[in-house]
Image: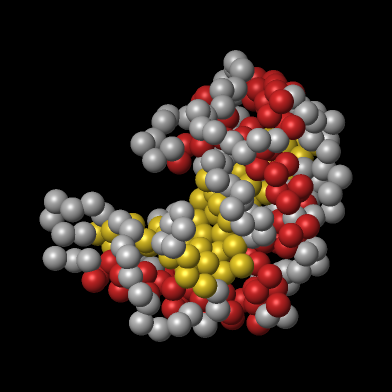
Amino acid sequence: MAWQRLGAVAPTALIPAREELHWATQVLAAAGETHLPHRPDTSHTAAVWLAEHGALAGFALQGVGRLALRFGDLSLLLLDGAGEIRAAQPLAGLTLAGACDWAAQAFSRHGGPGGALRRPDYEMPPHPIAEGGRFTAANGALAELGRWFANFALALSELEASRPEATPVLCWPHHFDIATLLELGGAAGAATQTIGLGLSPGDVHLPEPYVYVNHWPEQSFAPAQPLPAGEWRSEGWRGAQLRAAELVAAGSARAQQALLARFFDSAIAANRAALQSSAP
């Protein structure tokens, strides 16, 4: 899988599609919340990117396969153990409750667990879908958001493969970001130090997609070197962010990928230095 050039749709024009995809992803999260053993980090509600389907997919349910959300046409898929499509349902015209009902019935029809799906207990940004509105899938930006997620699943997976301290790449349904953590450890008795890297497709604070590299526990620091791209952020969280507009402006697919690599390298080093400066 190669990097796909970004920018066919302006980053700020992705908002309606991003909001619908975020709400549609809650069906995957509900399947995990209802039918999978709960994990302390809530990763039972998370999803992974399946390049062959252009979709996010939850973890497999015993005996039935896994539920996926295909971005290009905003459709739910039920996949078997080999990744083949057993059932599909476009979401246009459905409510969130209707989408959850379809998934529950698909599980039951194909030998999986029965019963209604329960959504995880976290707040979501306001949207008509939350009040019974229907998915439209009318925005042509769905495919562009698919390219964003495909590219970052690729970039983060390559980083995960090269760094033994990296955690699996997951999409988290609460904030709808796709991310990995570098687990650096800490002094005896101290909290584990981590560096987070990911893509947010946009949120209430920044409407366009952005790449982030942050650290925990948070430290107040002045980076020794300027970033080759992006900017430092101190409001809400501390770390580096690269806005979609700057990444798109790099031009070709190769130039975009190279800019991202330089951003990651420099931002990881600066965040690591911040954590080291706090060590006793």
Front-lying residue, 196 or 103: 196
- Residue 172: percent from the left, percent from the top? 53, 45
In the displayed orientation, state which residue is furthest to the top: 115
As drawn, is 75 to the left or to the right of 210?
Answer: right
Residue at left offset 65%, top offset 74%: 246
- Quick check: can you spot residue 210? yes
Position of residue 124 relative to residue 163, above or below, is above
Residue at left offset 83%, top offset 38%: 136
Quadrant of image for the N terminus: bottom right
In the displayed orientation, state which residue is furthest to the front: 235
As drawn, is 115 to the left or to the right of 275?
Answer: right
As drawn, is 117 to the left or to the right of 222?
Answer: right
Position of residue 240 relative to residue 106, above or below, is below
User: Residue 64 falls in which quadrant of the image?
Assistant: top right
The coloring applied to the image is secondary structure
Position of residue 224 relative to residue 212, above or below, is below
- Residue 74: percent from the left, percent from the top? 77, 43
- Quick check: can you spot residue 143? no
Residue at left offset 61%, top offset 50%: 203
- Residue 155: percent from the left, percent from the top? 55, 67
Residue at left offset 67%, top offset 59%: 208
User: Residue 166 falls in which quadrant of the image?
Assistant: bottom left
Front-lying residue, 9 or 257: 9
As drawn, is 24 to the left or to the right of 191?
Answer: right
